[in-house]
Amino acid sequence: MIADRWTFQIVEDFDAHYWTTFRDFDARARNELADGDRHVYEARMKQRERTREHPAHDAGPALAD
């Protein structure tokens, strides 16, 4: 794939130079803009779109027994 590079070297470089940087940026933005919460837009959309009183449209995740 890339001359003189093993697959694990490519994956490690990707993780160190792109993925880790992106994850750090994402975490910083989430902390600064959403108090650390993830999927804020989707959670709000779920509340807006759910059918109240419908048994399968609970506000939160089902609890495991």
Image: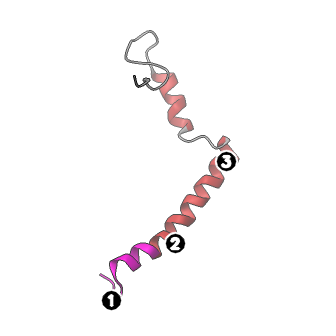
Residue 64, magenta (yes or no): no
Q: Position of residue 12 (x, y in %)?
A: 44, 74
Give the amino acid type for the residue marked by disc 1 in the picture: Ala
Residue 8, magenta (yes or no): yes
Colour theme:
secondary structure
Q: Which residue is mark 2?
A: 16
Of label 3 and label 1, which has the lower sequence position? 1
Residue 51 lies in what quarter of the image? top left
Q: CA distance from mark 3 to mark 1?
A: 40 Å
Q: Position of residue 23 (x, y in %)?
A: 55, 59
Q: Nearer the viewer, residue 31 or 62?
A: 62
Of label 2 and label 1, which has the lower sequence position? 1
SS category of the residue bearing label 3: helix
**On the rendered structure, is 58 left or right of 44?**
left
SS category of the residue bearing label 1: loop
Residue 6 sits above or below residue 60 on the image: below
Give the amino acid type for the residue marked by disc 3 in the picture: Asn
